[in-house]
Image: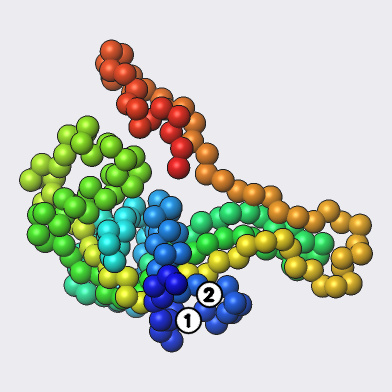
C-alpha cells in the first residue's frame, strides 16, 4: 500500500470527500508534474497569492525568487503559508449546465516556510528547479555563481500537512437529464510543447541538445 499522509482537520477534503487522496505517491506525482505553484500568505491583514516556480526535493517543496521579494522576505520570517498546485485534465460537459465540471488533480500543502541559508542546500534546490523542467540541463548550462546565490532567496516547506483532490471520469447528470438530446462527454486537456526556437545570438554551430529533441513531458 502507498504511504499515506494522515489528513489534518485543515487538509481533510470536506466537499466531495470521496475525491480526497492522502497517499504520498499520488501527491508527489501531482507535484512533480506541475510547473507553477501558488503561494498564499498574509501580511498586515492583506492576503496575497503569488505564482512561482517550485520543485519537490524529497519530502519538501522549495520555491524561490529575488532576495528583495516581499513574499520571500515575509515568508522567511516564518509566516504561515498555503501552497497549491493544480493540473487540468479535461472539461466535463454534462447535459445540464449545473453539472458541468472539470477533471483535475490538485494538491494543498500547509505549514511554515523557512529560508534556506546553506549554500549546498540552495544549490540542490536550484538543481531541482532546473532538472524538473529539463533533465540534463544543469550539467550543460553555467551553474549559479556565489553572487547569484546570494541574490536568490529560497524557502523550504516540509510536506507534513498535505492532501490531494482528484476528479476523473465522465459527467454525472441527474437521472432525468440522461434522456435529453444534448451531447455529453469529456474534452481531454494536455500540455503540449512546440519545437524549440533558437536564440538569435546562439551559435548556429551548436547542435540542439539531445534532451530537447522530440521533447515531451
The residue at the point 91 percent across, 57 percent down is 181
Would residue 84 be visible to someone looking at this image? no
Name the quadrant containing residue 159: bottom left
Name the quadrant containing residue 213: top left
Query: Which of the image's four quarters has the C terminus?
Result: top left
The residue at the point 20 percent across, 69 percent down is 114
Q: What's the coloring here?
A: rainbow
Question: In this image, 114 relative to 40: left or right?
Answer: left
From this view, report whether residue 160 is shown above or below residue 214. Answer: below
From this view, report whether residue 10 is shown above or below residue 183. Answer: below
Q: Are marks 2 and 1 in contact (CB under 8 Å)?
A: yes
Q: CA distance from mark 2 to mark 1?
A: 7 Å
Q: Which residue is mark 2?
A: 20
Question: Most extreme residue toward the top, as rendered?
Answer: 205
The residue at the point 72 percent across, 61 percent down is 170
Name the quadrant containing residue 203: top left
Question: Disc 2 on helix, strand or loop?
Answer: strand
Query: In the depicted view, which residue is nearer to us: 24 or 71?
Result: 24
The x, y position of residue 169, in whole percent, is 67, 61
From this view, report whether residue 179 is shown above or below residue 139. Answer: below
The x, y position of residue 150, in whole percent, is 11, 51
Q: Which residue is mark 1?
A: 12
The x, y position of residue 87, in whole percent, is 51, 56
Query: Which of the image's four quarters has the N terminus?
Result: bottom left
The residue at the point 28 percent across, 65 percent down is 60
Question: In this image, 117 relative to 210: left or right?
Answer: left
Would residue 217 be visible to someone looking at this image? yes
Amino acid at each position: 500500500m502507498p504511504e499515506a499522509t494522515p489528513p489534518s482537520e485543515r487538509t481533510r477534503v470536506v466537499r466531495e470527500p470521496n475525491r480526497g487522496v492522502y497517499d504520498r505517491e499520488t501527491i508527489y506525482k501531482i507535484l512533480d508534474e506541475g510547473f507553477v505553484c501558488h503561494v498564499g500568505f498574509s501580511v498586515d491583514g492583506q492576503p496575497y497569492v503569488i505564482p512561482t516556480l517550485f520543485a519537490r526535493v524529497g519530502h519538501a517543496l522549495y520555491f524561490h525568487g529575488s532576495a528583495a521579494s516581499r513574499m520571500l522576505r515575509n515568508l522567511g520570517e516564518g509566516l504561515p503559508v498555503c501552497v497549491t498546485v493544480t493540473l487540468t485534465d479535461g472539461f466535463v460537459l454534462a447535459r445540464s449546465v449545473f453539472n458541468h465540471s472539470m477533471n483535475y488533480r490538485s494538491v494543498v500543502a500547509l505549514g511554515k516556510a523557512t529560508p534556506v541559508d546553506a549554500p549546498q542546500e540552495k544549490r540542490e534546490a536550484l538543481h531541482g528547479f532546473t532538472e524538473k523542467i529539463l533533465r540534463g540541463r544543469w550539467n550543460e548550462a553555467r551553474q549559479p555563481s556565489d553572487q547569484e546565490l546570494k541574490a536568490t532567496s529560497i524557502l523550504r516547506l516540509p510536506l507534513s500537512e498535505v492532501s490531494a483532490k482528484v476528479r476523473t471520469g465522465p459527467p454525472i447528470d441527474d437521472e432525468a437529464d440522461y434522456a435529453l438530446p444534448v451531447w455529453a462527454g469529456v474534452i481531454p486537456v494536455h500540455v503540449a510543447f512546440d519545437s524549440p526556437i533558437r536564440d538569435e545570438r546562439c551559435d548556429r554551430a551548436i547542435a540542439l541538445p539531445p534532451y530537447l529533441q522530440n521533447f515531451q513531458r
